[in-house]
Image (tube, rainbow, N blue to C red):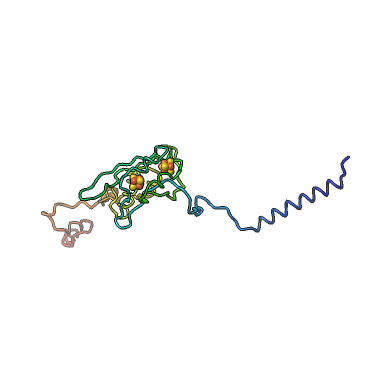
Amino acid sequence: MSNPIKEVYDGFKSLVTGMRITIGEFFKPTITVQYPHESLKMPARFRGHIELVRDPETGRAVCFACKLCERACPSDCITVDGAKLEGAKKKSVTLYQLDFTKCSLCGSCVEACRDGAIRFSREFNLASTSKDEFVMDLFKRLEAEREAAEGTNRLAVGSPSEKVAVPAPAPATAPSVPAPVLPATPPATSTPPVSTSATTPPPAASGESK
Ligand code: SF4
Ligand code: SF4
């Protein structure tokens, strides 16, 4: 048979224990991050999708399309192409396509690149309902960012991060602004510019009205 006094004691003890934990947590610093208005600082070893490294001197990709990373990828998600520019000793990358839907972020490609031409990005915010959005041309994106920085952006890119990174080019003219509606003026050859005074009576005609 249960003892009602013991039950009340156990209930009270449980209540005090719970309140002690609750009050203790109440005075601890807040760790909630108000995403998406705030975001955590990514740790140094965070792995976003790979990205091409830019040569700080030329502003262009370090990659010279040797395809070592393409061969090292176990998921077959890298496609590299390049061409030798006139006068250049090495090839230059012209296509660096990453199919991020297949990437396991294993790092084999980064390790295979002996020139440090690729690295893991800090991008953590990718989201889309279309798989096509995650097939990205990293070379095109790098060039678009460079051209945008120089104000000569011409390339159209498709991944979510690319869309954010590349501002729309400024139109050469302003077609969206309607032309101002000017008052109808007679041909300049027949009358002087004072034709706009039609709203005010000419002084010479005042004698006729009397
Ligand atoms: S991280 Fe691994 S799976 Fe992803 S592209 Fe590189 S080698 Fe391929
Ligand atoms: S990223 Fe590195 S390994 Fe891959 S093609 Fe370019 S230079 Fe070669």
> Left or right: 137 with respect to 23?
left
Residue depicted at 48% across the width and 51% down the height: 45
Quarter placement of the C terminus: bottom left
The image quadrant in which ligand 1 is located: top left
Residue under the point 85% across and 47% down: 6
The image quadrant of residue 209 is bottom left
Res. 73 in view: yes
- Indicate whether 16 appears above or below 157: below
Q: Which residue is located at x 44 percent, y 48 percent?
A: 123
Farthest residue, direction left = 189
152 displayed left or right of 76: left
Give residue 49's quadrant in the image.
Answer: top left
Q: Quadrant of the N terminus?
A: top right
* Residue name at image x 14 percent, y 58 percent: 192
Q: Does residue 77 sit above or below 124 in this rendering? A: above
The percent coordinates of residue 137 (x first, y second) are 35, 43
Q: How many marks?
A: 0
Nearer-the-camera pick, 113 or 16? 113
The x and y percentages for residue 78 are 37, 40
Of residue 54 and residue 2, the one placed in the foreground of this image is: 54
> At which x and y percent is residue 19?
73, 53
Instruction: Say whether residue 153 is left or right of residue 1.
Output: left
Q: Nearer the viewer, residue 28 or 67?
A: 67
Query: In the rendered image, is residue 138 in sight?
Result: no
Rendered position, 205 above or below 49: below
